[in-house]
Amino acid sequence: MRSKENPNNKSTEGRIMEHARKLFLRKGYHGTTVDDIARSAKLTKGSFYWYFKSKEDMLRRIFLEFEKFFLDSMIRSINAVEGGTLDKIAKFIRFIPAFAYYNPELCVAFTTLSGELVGTRHKIETDIRRIYKRYQDFLAELVVQGIQEGVVRKDLNPDLVASVIIAFHSGILFQWFMNKGRIDERAYVETFNKMLLKGFLSEGTRFP
């Protein structure tokens, strides 16, 4: 039975999606055809349609895969933390690079495909905006809690902070992916964390 808890499972369906993500990153969604995906996965076009109704159906599954394995997992992990906002922020900062390290293509595919499709009136845009809204709302609530506890600056707008964190992380992830093998990953993550924390934690707050 195919594992439903691993975005990198090697079932036929998972293999097709893996090849599709690689092609989408290289050629874009619009520049990639079903024939391209089938050839890359060494399958017939008919085999593709056995698992997916269309290229759009596959794209939607990639986005839902990101939501399930990244966003849902992150929210569960942070909500399970016993402690205050600083402990939850620490969990967030550990979770992000760890997930991106083991699932770089899934993360970058979501970011780049979102950029390609938002504003084009593609049907999938509704899913993209919904996922980003969940992500932003969750982080904004974390910021609100931090303000109430006095560990996050009170002069900041929680929604804007959440949006900036997401944008910052997406850009960092893309740069790391492009420069993989040419940069010190640990130093990259530490720099990201220091810049992020310095920007929104209250003066004098000690991070765990």
Image (spheres, rainbow, N blue to C red):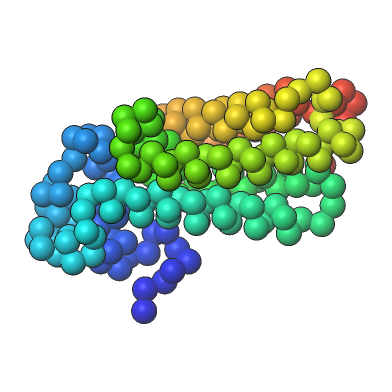
**Residue 124 location (% of width, % of height):** 35, 43
Q: Quadrant of the N terminus?
A: bottom left
Q: Quadrant of the C terminus?
A: top right
Q: Nearer the viewer, residue 47 or 25?
A: 47
Q: How many marks?
A: 0
Q: Is residue 163 left or right of residue 46?
A: right
Q: Residue at x 67, y 30 (%)?
A: 159
**Residue 52 location (% of width, % of height):** 23, 60
Quadrant hosting residue 164:
top right
User: Can the viewer see residue 204?
Assistant: yes
Q: Residue at x 44, y 31 (%)?
A: 174
**Residue 12 location (% of width, % of height):** 25, 66
Q: Residue at x 58, y 44 (%)?
A: 134
Q: Is residue 124 left or right of residue 23?
A: right
Q: Residue at x 82, y 57 (%)?
A: 82
Quadrant hosting residue 116:
top left
Q: Nearer the viewer, residue 50 or 203?
A: 50
**Residue 106 location (% of width, % of height):** 41, 47
Q: Which residue lies most toward the bottom here? A: 1
Q: Is residue 52 above or below residue 161?
A: below
User: Can the viewer see residue 192?
Assistant: no
Q: Nearer the viewer, residue 59 or 103?
A: 59
Q: Is residue 99 left or right of residue 11?
A: right
Q: Is residue 12 above or below residue 31?
A: below
